[in-house]
Amino acid sequence: MNKSEKTQTSGPASLSVIVLAAGKGTRMKSPLPKVLHPVAGQPMVGRVLQAAKAVGAKELRVVVGHGESLVRRVIEPLGAIAFQQKEQKGTADAVLSADPGSMTGTVLILSGDTPLIEGKDLAAIISEFNDLRADVAVVTAELKNPGSLGRIVRQKGELKAIVEAGDAGADTLKIREINSGTYIAKASVLADLLSQVKPNNSKGEFYLTDIISIGLEDGLKVVAIKGRPAMAYGVNTQEELARASRVVFTRNRKKLMENGVVMIDPATVYAEDDVVIGGGTVVYPNVYLRGASRIGHYCVLEPGVHIISSSVADSTHIKAGCYFENCVVGEKVQIGPYARLRPETSIGREAHIGNFVEMKKTVFGARSKAGHLTYLGDAKIGDDVNIGCGTITCNYAADRKKYETVIGDGAFVGSDVQFVAPIKIGDGAVIASGSTITEDVPAKALAIARGRQVNKPDWKSPSEASSMTGQKIGSAPGTATATRDEKD
């Protein structure tokens, strides 16, 4: 019985994942750890972990190094455990830092800077690995321009070696199948192979690729499993990062359009992974949809709309230049242009929010209107309320606390009104334009809080009065001022 037969097990093996994320990413020219650079709004390492979780990995181990504290803040909320690589001594050393000897079942090794990997890619790799009853496998891909990536050398279809581009001859460099940097192995086999890796290179580093040659020499079943080219896309520069984002945005746009979303100019629409848009909605150019935003059916999103983690119900029209964040918008609402809805704001059905209106932590009732140039913060606005131009809720007090304004159903608020919170306005009340309201207003009452108008008939300005009386401006009343004729 050979070594391969000894390591085979019956039944589906549990899956653990090691993600290599310790590198600095010098070519990124950025103080941010490389794996935390975002691709279409999500850190690269987060995308890799998301793909691993999609295939049911029981354990996620991430090898950290440069920027460890920042990387931990991202990966730990995603359910991953951080393992520190104390010194940068190569990829095999990085894997050893994750303590693979304590793992069981099948181990998948991924790079934290390959953000285009998807769960379906890993599922296919794992399935083929199990079907082949292999001990260890390298995942490969065919590229039009392999460049400096290691080449996969086969003989009669079977894997024979991985040859680094710098060591390859002219014929080997013509090979388009390359090493993607992803590996899969039985846990016991991986631990044994890693223990045999030596730093036999000019840099004195421990290379993970050596587990393939060692496995072949030991008579194990070592295979090369071909994956999509996207699996081999590693990000090392800002240009490559931007290219990865374009790939993801294109992928997301395609899915949305397949579900009936109308895009005037798809290349200028940016929708992150968790965005959902209903069929029949029209999206104009330069729209950015982030987070877990939900847009209903038959909506219109005009140019320059930016929506973050918000929900917009059916048949709502969002005009140009609007900015929403963590808010909820009801059905058949019209908003904008250039309106801003800040967190914890909720807009009732058939409401109208006009240009240059800002709301923060405000509940705005059904069919209510705020036509223009208004700020409503920490407020509860009832149904069928009219908010006049220039209205402000004065919610932030001298004690540095926020206070609430409550306006009842059917109230009418004139233009240029200030509500000094905390304050309550009853149902059907009317607030006169130009008022500063500092006391509660009963239902159906008229509130006027402004200086009394005074008209002075036949009033003349000081300059006019001076010319009529021969006085200098500023001289005492009744005091004559000599003219040139009198002096003469």
Image (tube, grey):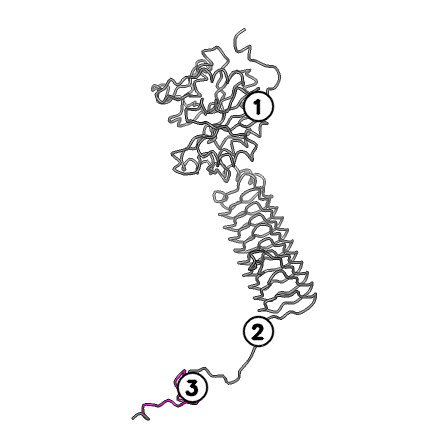
Give the labeled residue for mark 1: 15
Residue 480 falls inside the magenta stretch:
yes
| Residue at the top extreme, as displayed | 1
Q: Label 2 crowding class (10 Å Cα cut-off): few <14, some 14-19, many 20+?
A: few
Q: Label 3 crowding class (10 Å Cα cut-off): few <14, some 14-19, many 20+?
A: few
Give the labeled residue for mark 2: 451
Q: Amino acid at mark 3?
A: Ala
Q: Quadrant of residue 243?
A: top left
Front-lying residue, 320 or 10: 10
Magenta stretch bounds: 470-485
Query: Is the residue 217 above or below the residue 375 in the image?
Result: above
Q: Amino acid at mark 2?
A: Gly
In the rendered image, the quadrant that contains the C terminus is bottom left
Front-lying residue, 101 or 110: 101
Residue 444, horizontal then vertical, whole percent? 70, 67
Give the labeled residue for mark 3: 476
Q: Nearer the viewer, mark 3 or mark 1?
A: 3
Query: Is the residue 296 above or below the residue 431 in the image?
Result: above
Residue 391, horizontal then vertical, whole percent? 57, 63
Most common SS among magenta residues: loop
The residue shown at (57%, 32%) is 79
Circle number at residue 258: none
Which secondary structure, mark 3?
Answer: loop
